Image (cartoon, grey):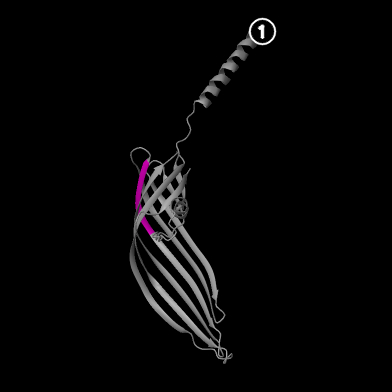
């Protein structure tokens, strides 16, 4: 009997020791911080700005951003995207105009984040960019000889530059931030125009085509605000 009690006691002590070891094992350190941001300038303007005639000076086209940073070093990869689609038609009975705008902006870069005093943090990095605009306009003038003018504008640019951001943490996971950048872009713009007349339905004119080289450098001031979720 004593032999069985000794074995049972030893077993209980062994299980208890293992349980304490498991409960005191520390969790692995977090390897990466993920951040998703969305522009809130329009929301802030609706809430705080009552002057409807004010001009929107925000030139930052990237509506959504995503960043993944190493928790220890702060080095990370950032992605941004913006998309704009708009279709509008005007018609006064004689002139009818339809415009379709289809624009896409992409960026990919690397950055280094820094912890500042209190709830503040900052970062700096380099981005590569690619933008494509595909806009179409159809203008119809109704008369004895109705004229239809189709204009297609395609703009493709690429480039890059430096950026920096500043953020404030309301909680561990909720932040608000702004950023500034200097980007240089270069590319080509192609404008194709086709004119047709109702008096010549079988006439298929050769479109007028213009190719233009585009280059520009732009500074985006820190006037864009992002609401950011960090996890």
Q: Is residue 192 left or right of residue 94?
A: left
> Residue 172 falls in which quadrant of the image?
top left
Q: Residue extending furthest top?
A: 2
How many numbered discs sit on the rendered protein? 1
> Residue 59 falls in which quadrant of the image?
bottom left
- Tell me the residue at 37%/54% (across/down): 223
Q: Please tell me which residue lies in front, 1 or 199.
A: 199
Secondary element under disc 1, as helix, strand or loop, is: loop
Relative height, residue 196 to residue 64 (above, below): below
Asked if the stretch drawn in magenta spans residue 121, the answer is yes
Tell me where residue 114 appears, x and y as whole percent.
Answer: 35, 44
Q: Please tell me which residue lies in front, 2 or 212.
A: 212
Would you name the residue on which mark 1 appears?
1
- Tell me the residue at 47%/64% (across/down): 104
Relative height, residue 49 to residue 3 (above, below): below
The secondary structure that dominates the magenta segment is: strand
Q: Which residues are magenta?
A: 120-127
Tell me where residue 115 appears, x and y as whole percent.
Answer: 35, 41
- Tell me the residue at 48%/71% (across/down): 134
Relative height, residue 6 to residue 120 (above, below): above
Relative height, residue 172 to residue 51 (above, below): above
Tell me where residue 42 appears, x and y as whole percent.
Answer: 46, 55
Asked if the stretch drawn in magenta spans residue 184, the answer is no
> Residue 70 falls in which quadrant of the image?
top left
On the rendered image, what quadrant is the N terminus found in? Answer: top right
- Tell me the residue at 47%/60% (across/down): 82
């Amino acid at each position: 009997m004593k032999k069985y009690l000794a074995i049972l006691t030893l077993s209980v002590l062994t299980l208890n020791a293992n349980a304490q070891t498991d409960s005191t094992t520390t969790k692995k350190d977090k390897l990466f911080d993920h951040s998703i941001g969305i522009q809130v300038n329009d929301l802030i303007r609706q809430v705080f700005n009552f002057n409807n005639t004010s001009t929107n000076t925000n030139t930052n086209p990237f509506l959504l951003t995503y960043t993944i940073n190493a928790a220890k070093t702060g080095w990370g990869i950032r992605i941004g995207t913006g998309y704009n689609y708009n279709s509008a038609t005007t018609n006064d009975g004689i002139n009818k105009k339809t415009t379709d705008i289809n624009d896409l902006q992409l960026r990919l870069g690397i950055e280094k984040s820094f912890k500042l005093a209190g709830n503040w943090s900052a970062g700096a990095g380099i981005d590569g960019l690619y933008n494509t605009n595909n806009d179409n306009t159809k203008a119809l003038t109704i008369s004895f000889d109705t004229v239809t003018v189709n204009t297609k504008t395609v703009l493709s640019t690429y480039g890059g530059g430096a950026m920096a951001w500043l953020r404030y943490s309301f909680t561990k996971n909720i932040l608000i931030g702004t950023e500034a950048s200097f980007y240089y872009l270069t590319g080509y713009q192609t404008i194709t125009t086709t004119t047709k007349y109702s008096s010549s339905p079988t006439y298929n004119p050769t479109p007028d085509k213009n190719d233009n080289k585009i280059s520009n450098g732009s500074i985006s001031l820190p006037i864009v605000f992002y609401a950011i979720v960090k996890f």
